Amino acid sequence: MDRIKDAEVIRLIEQIGEHYRANIANRFLRPVLLQLQVDKSTWDLIEEFTEKMEQYRYQGFHLDELYRQIAACARFVELARNKSNIKSKMNAIPAGESDKILREMAVSNFSSNLQVFTDLLSELYMILIEFDKKNSGDRPPLYTQMSELYLVGRLIVGQ
């Protein structure tokens, strides 16, 4: 399959990465998020998806890699949603007086920022599925053949 070089897909991936870095995996929340029971391969896929955009911008994206990265992000979202004691864990981490307000803001807005991240992932996933359907020809679309995608919709929606 050809690489995806669609401007809308690239813009959306950039937006997801920027939102993730600024509002979810920022310096205040990252230490707590790293305590989630997420395996290294999942973290690697999330990092590649949210932080290493430059290497793909001009070459394009492989659809199967994007699907795997979205699945990894969906697993992360599920675990982060179920992490009810983020605030208590944050309070256990010492912070300077100047960082206290910023840290409290990061914790207070975590749920809504996680929802924005999830909404962006869902939008990208739907765009990729449509692309996949249009370009699969006589073959079944790739997303129907990848077992790791079976629960992505549910994980993103939170059901």
Image (cartoon, helix red, strand yellow):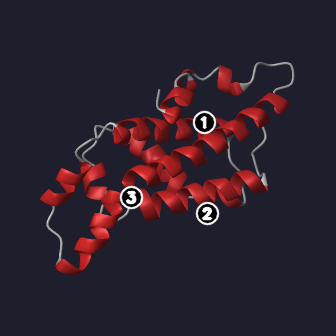
**Which residue in the structure is indicated by mark 3?**
109
Residue 23 in the image: above or below residue 149: below
* Mark carried by residue 82: none
**Which residue in the structure is indicated by mark 2?**
54
Instruction: Determine the residue positioned at 65% across, 20% down.
Output: 145
* Mark carried by residue 67: 1
Q: Residue furthest bottom?
A: 98
Residue 94 in the image: above or below residue 126: below
Which of the two labelled residues, at mark 3 and mark 2, occupies the earlier sequence position? 2
Which of the two labelled residues, at mark 3 and mark 1, occupies the earlier sequence position? 1
> Where does residue 58 sit, x and y in percent of width and height?
72, 60
Looking at numbered disc 1 in the image, what kind of residue is underneath it?
A: Tyr
Looking at numbered disc 2 in the image, what kind of residue is underneath it?
A: Glu
Q: Is residue 51 visible?
A: no
In this rendering, position of residue 96 left or right of residue 119: left
Q: What whole-number distance in Å separates the C-alpha atoms at marks 1 and 2? A: 18 Å
Looking at numbered disc 3 in the image, what kind of residue is underneath it?
A: Asn
Badge 1: residue crowd in 10 Å (few <14, some 14–19, many ≥20): many
